[in-house]
Amino acid sequence: MALRAIIFATMVGAMAKLVERTEDNDLVLRAKTQAGALGRLYEMYYERIFRFCVHRLFNKEIAEDVTSTVFLNVARGIRDFAGRSEQDFRNWLYAIAANQANAYIRKSSRRKKLLAEAAGSMVPARTGSLEKSFEPDWPGLYAVILRLKPRHQTIVTLRFFENFSYEQIAQILDVKEANVRVTLHRILNKLRNQLKTVYDGEI
Amino acid sequence: MFKDEADFEKVVGRLNIDTEPNPAHRENLRRQMLSVFNQAEQESATRIIVFRTLRNLIMKSPITKIAAAAVIIIAVLIGLNIVGTSTPAFAEIVKPFLTARTASFKMTMEVESVPTQTFDCLYAEPIRMRQTNHEQGAIVISDFQQGKIVTLMPAQNKAMIVELENMPEDQGKFNMFSEIRKHIQEAQQTQDESVQFLGEKKINGLTVIGYHVQKPAVDITVWADPQTKLPVEMTNTSGPTTYTMTDIVFNVELDESLFSLEIPEGYTIRTMQVDASKPTEKDLIELFRIWAEHMDGNLPSVLDLNATMEFVKYQQKKMKEKGQEPSEESVLELQKTIMRMGRGAVFVQQLPTESDWHYTGKDVKFGDAEKPIFWYRPEGSKTYRVIYGDLSIKSVALENLPQ
């Protein structure tokens, strides 16, 4: 009896998941014409996009501004959005967020300001900081990430801060998965060298 | 430091990063986003109804026929005002940039589920346009400096003259071509992140360079000749509507008579005066008042040009019920009424996204002092203006807005 109950419960659970997924797919289609459905998508993704923006832009106020731009663009563009599934929507949303964040920091004055802010929040490294146990704090790591190309910054954020798979990152950036792997490998080498330089006091 | 990817992952995992969102921002953005979504829908609906009205210009009922003409004129005024004052990217472009004295181009207008329409357009300094739609047999000649729009229907020997009164002075600064060329210059000279270079392509054998300009309320793709820096093709997309300008020729010789506002002999002429000043909140109040007066105490179900058709149909129905035939005079009166209400609709259309406007008047009876029907935040104001069913107005803080 207990076994049957477990099987039944599992089946119900699986069906619930299936229904949930179908509903989510419908949700994207409905969001093209229904404000309520768009509102639900917003609730599902607001925090994720805000978090992505904080990771990309360090400053929470700036992250709020960019998050606003992202969702307002979604509101204007969703009727013309060709995707149908939630996965399509997520890729589209993160692509917009990545573009907006990159657009923000592309202006050198803004980038300098962010760098200064991060540098000002850094805990100064002590002598001998390059011991194996040493780890950079968030401002320190951000300052180094900000020296990367904007597109590379996006890859780092999506991979390590948002925990996206290579495949998902490739979909968002519209490139091949192998390309992401190779690029990330190079980025990590660069980051390692940069961190050594910064914490070694060379710059 | 870190050795490999897995190691770096652990380093990141141990970071203490504050990503807690601000609930107020979350709520405000939600409201703003849905407002933008609804507004975009209404703009699309407006364009569709104007387009359909154009297509169905020749209708059976005389009352509807006249009303359709009124809708077209309202549409012209909406376009005029939007370009002149409310669209942010366009509003930035105020300096005269245009060197072309005249221009000719084709404009195709595509709207979802409606056949594509083509207009032959002629432009001449300072602000004159002649738009011919062969399919509908309508020619619209506008001269905003003279404050006049003339619509000719040669097949019917009919003409309508609209005299625009109280035109805002800054309307004279508007120039369609200057905007396009300004966008191209911006793209070439600045690092503006809203302008994206599209590379090269060929149009009719000519290599052109393209730019995509995307800003709030602006989604333009311009393909230009890199040698002359003049646009070859311009596409403006907004929701389901796309306008494309092609065959653009600058400084073409155009006979002055093409822009003549004189009506050919033998035409039946109607003349109408229209207040073309910038609409204000008072115009919106007037819209509600007139609507209630003519619609048995009800208020509009929506605030766009769909409402105009709703209004016309209702009046038509009332006349039918009374067994009345619309007289020339009553039709003209109705047309003027629609024009007056149109100003209220234009006021709403001109409100920027940030105004966060909402309309909830559907099913509310005129005179109900308890029910809010419209609210918006005026530019620079911290509080909202809330209009109630009795048309009283109160200033209300964001947190006290109707749910």
Image: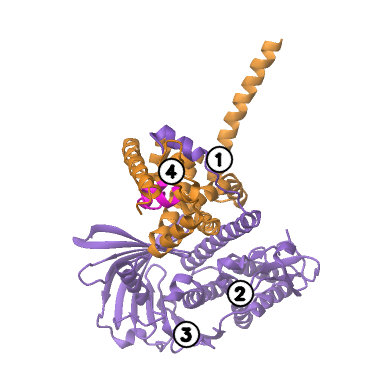
Question: Would you say the residues marked 2 and 4 are in contact, meaning their CB atoms lie under 8 Å apart?
Answer: no
- Sequence-wise, the earlier of marks 4 and 1 is 1
Q: Which residues are magenta?
A: A141-154
What whole-number distance in Å separates the C-alpha atoms at marks 4 and 3? 64 Å
Q: Helix, strand or loop at disc 1?
A: helix
- Mark 3 residue crowding within 10 angstroms, few (<14) / some (14–19) / many (20+): few
- Amino acid bearing label 1: Asp
Disc 4: which chain?
A
What whole-number distance in Å separates the C-alpha atoms at marks 3 and 1? 47 Å
Image quadrant in which the N terminus of chain B is located: top left
The label shown at residue B285 is none
- Amino acid bearing label 4: Ser
The answer to whether marks 2 and 4 sit on the same chain is no
The residue pinned by badge 1 equals A26
Q: Which chain is orange?
A: A
The label shown at residue B380 is 2
Disc 1: which chain?
A
Identity of the residue furthest to the top in this view:
A1
